[in-house]
Image (cartoon, helix red, strand yellow):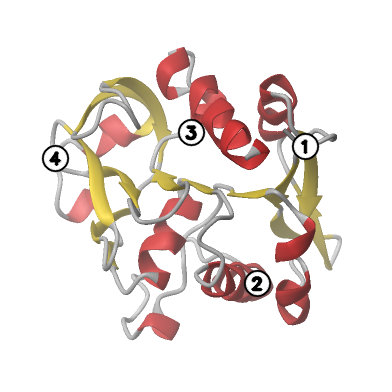
Amino acid sequence: MPQHRPLIAITADLMIRNDRPTAFSTMTYTRSVLQAGGVPVILPPTPDHSDDLISRFDAFIFTGGDDPVTEPFGVPTHPAAVRVLDDRQRFETRLLQQLQHHPDTPVLGICLGMQMMGLVAGGSLNQNLPDTHESHSDHWEHHHDIRSIDESLVPSGTTYSKHRQAIDNPGSLRVLASAHDGVIEAIDDPDRRFYLGVQWHPERTDNAPLGQDIINKLVRAAEG
């Protein structure tokens, strides 16, 4: 066991406030990491310095946010997308690419974070669920059930979601759980120590096995 509580990096969101780029994070992520026994550190987007960060942290959380810009992945961005700011996307893309060379570093992707994991793994998105799913409102600020293929990693149960996009092809990653309407809800890489993406928000899900326990598992993995 390490002599220190693990340092958990949490990617910050980015917005333009008073004409200036502003990095921020909701406190739900911080509180969940603290409750799990980790030390949370908010990472502002620094696209040119992502390589320097990996050795300094014990685990990474890629947080929720706006919608990915998909031109860098060879697909036009849907006109209904609320585009994530470029510095954030470039930073998180680069960081995920570099983490591929560090399979022992635990990684958790939440909502947008999961979508970015899928894109970096060569996958693709359904960029507008209202175009394809009559049940799309079940995924926007609603609770709904998911079904898992590996209950030891992610149990089946009720989650809280807020998204209008979803992964439709996970690339090199595995589909771990789906919703009642077939929307992919969790992905992972079983060959890595802990590499999990969830489409819901565990930091806002009251159902502990799919809420706080997800963060607990990340921190335990970070402890070694």
- For the residue pair 145 and 71, the one nearer the viewer reads as 145
Residue lying at 71% horizontally and 59% vertically, measured from the top left: 14
Residue lying at 84% horizontally and 68% vertically, measured from the top left: 19
Q: Earlier in the sequence, mark 4 or mark 3?
A: 4
Dot 1: few (<14), some (14–19), or many (≥20) neighbours within 10 Å? few
Residue 91 circle label: 2
Q: Amino acid at mark 2?
A: Phe
Q: Amino acid at mark 4?
A: Glu
Dot 3: few (<14), some (14–19), or many (≥20) neighbours within 10 Å? many
* Distance Cα–Cα, label 3 vs label 1: 29 Å
Q: Which type of secondary structure does the marked residue at label 3 adopt?
A: loop
Q: Which type of secondary structure does the marked residue at label 2 adopt?
A: helix
Q: Which type of secondary structure does the marked residue at label 1 adopt?
A: loop
The quarter of the picture where the C terminus appears is top right
Dot 4: few (<14), some (14–19), or many (≥20) neighbours within 10 Å? few
Q: Amino acid at mark 1?
A: Pro
Residue 177 found in image quarter: top left
Query: In the visual, does 171 lie left or right of 66?
Result: left
Residue 80 found in image quarter: bottom left
Residue 201 circle label: 3
Which one is in front in this view, the residue at disc 4 or the one at disc 3? Answer: 3
Residue lying at 61% horizontally and 69% vertically, measured from the top left: 95
Q: Is residue 138 above or below residue 193?
A: above
Q: Earlier in the sequence, mark 3 or mark 1?
A: 1
Q: Amino acid at mark 3?
A: His
Q: Earlier in the sequence, mark 4 or mark 2?
A: 2
Which one is in front in this view, the residue at disc 1 or the one at disc 4? Answer: 1
